[in-house]
């Protein structure tokens, strides 16, 4: 068997193994991302808010200004989760379903009826400083007309850039002095 | 022929793994409770709040999204809409805390979630990254060490996504 085919088969075997039982699937899915350093560089920026709590509040307000609804927020943990969604109207769904039934046949591909973008933000103040590391990660859940939900990680980085630019505009500079 | 076969195997593998999370009863591990507790727990000498912050940072670093964070030291999160984990941090006195993780896997394995009981999963995917985040080594719990109950994570769909 040629080397390339052996390599392709070897690549498929772990995927198949991961699908065979939940432990192996969890071991594969739960592993640190291979591009973790790249993700950190894209998802983390430094800010200088007066305190970590102010940074968390500013991050929540920034998400809201981008159309996200706050799903979860914790000052204690420095974490926020927000979501925003877009969906087809009932008439549009009915129209597409009818069109598929008439022209698409039984094997017609499903279509997305609702798409939710989720943003996870964490804030961590460096000890003894007024510098906070703010991290944002985003993902998308798309529900199709058959009720199935597909997950997509790493959506466009435009969301990250927009978030950081808006957050930077909220930084309030206080006169230097001892930390409260 | 071989190319087509390889493509088919890859397609089947990807389709199998792309199954959406379904609702149904959770399938619990069949391992003895004490043994599972030791697999899921580690002890570390650190401030509980510092450990909880490290848990939050570690889960975010690994690509999880938080589903709940409570004031008692429990953080729950989900990765890729398939893998759920809850991590509880409990002080034990003497400046030490016990960290216990409990993970559930969704997909085509069962109608609901299945409890993960593989020691390698907890060591490589939870405790090693957490130790790295803390800059401390997490130690195995001793026999007879009182352990916090495992917290069962539940998928909480975002309010914008009904169903």
Image (cartoon, helix red, strand yellow):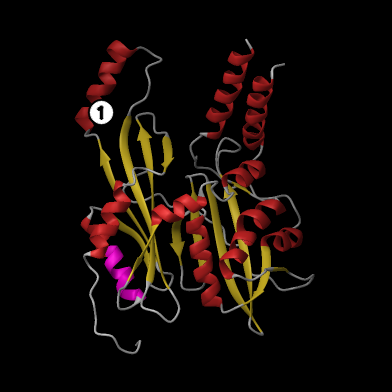
Quick check: A141 left or right of B123?
left
* Residue at position x 43%, y 52% in the image: B156
Q: Position of residue B103 (x, y in %)?
A: 59, 53
Q: Position of residue B142 (x, y in %)?
A: 77, 71
* Rendered position, A152 above or below A44: above
* Residue at position x 32%, y 39% in the image: A115
Q: Quadrant of the N terminus of chain A?
A: top right
Q: Residue furthest bottom?
A: A178
- Tell me which segment is drawn in magenta: A52-60
Residue A55 lies in the magenta-colored region: yes
Q: Position of residue B162 (x, y in %)?
A: 34, 44
Q: Position of residue B30 (x, y in %)?
A: 73, 49
Residue A115 lies in the magenta-colored region: no
* Residue at position x 36%, y 78% in the image: A130
Quick check: B85 left or right of A144?
right
Q: Residue furthest right?
A: B143
């Amino acid at each position: 068997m040629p080397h390339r085919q052996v390599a392709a088969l070897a690549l498929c075997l772990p995927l198949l193994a991961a699908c065979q039982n939940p432990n192996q699937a969890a071991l594969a899915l739960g592993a640190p991302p291979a591009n973790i350093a790249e993700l950190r560089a894209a998802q983390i920026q430094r800010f200088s808010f007066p305190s970590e709590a102010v940074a968390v509040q500013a991050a929540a307000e920034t998400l809201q200004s981008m159309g996200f609804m706050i799903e979860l927020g914790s000052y204690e943990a420095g974490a926020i989760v927000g979501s925003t969604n877009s969906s087809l109207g009932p008439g549009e769904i009915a129209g597409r379903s009818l069109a598929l039934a008439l022209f698409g046949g039984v094997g017609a591909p499903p279509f997305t009826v609702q798409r939710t973008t989720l943003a996870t933000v964490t804030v961590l103040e460096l000890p003894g400083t007024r510098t906070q590391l703010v991290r944002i990660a985003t993902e998308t859940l798309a529900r199709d007309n058959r009720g199935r939900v597909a997950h997509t990680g790493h959506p466009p980085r435009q969301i990250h850039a927009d978030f950081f630019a808006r957050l930077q505009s909220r930084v309030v500079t206080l006169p230097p002095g001892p930390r409260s | 022929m071989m190319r087509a076969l390889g493509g088919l195997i890859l397609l089947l593998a990807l389709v199998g793994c792309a199954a959406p999370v379904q609702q149904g009863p959770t399938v619990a591990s069949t391992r003895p409770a004490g043994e599972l507790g030791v697999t899921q727990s580690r002890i570390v000498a650190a401030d509980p709040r510092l450990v909880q912050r490290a848990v939050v940072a570690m889960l975010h670093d690994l690509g999880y999204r938080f589903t709940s964070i409570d004031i008692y030291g429990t953080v729950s999160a989900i990765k890729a809409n398939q893998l759920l984990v809850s991590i509880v941090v409990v002080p034990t006195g003497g400046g030490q805390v016990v960290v216990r993780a409990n993970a559930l896997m969704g997909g085509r394995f069962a109608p609901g979630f299945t409890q993960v009981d593989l020691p390698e999963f907890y060591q490589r995917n939870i405790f090693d990254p957490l130790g790295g985040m803390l800059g401390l080594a997490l130690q195995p719990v001793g026999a007879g060490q009182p352990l916090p109950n495992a917290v069962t994570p539940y998928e909480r769909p975002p309010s914008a996504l009904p169903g």
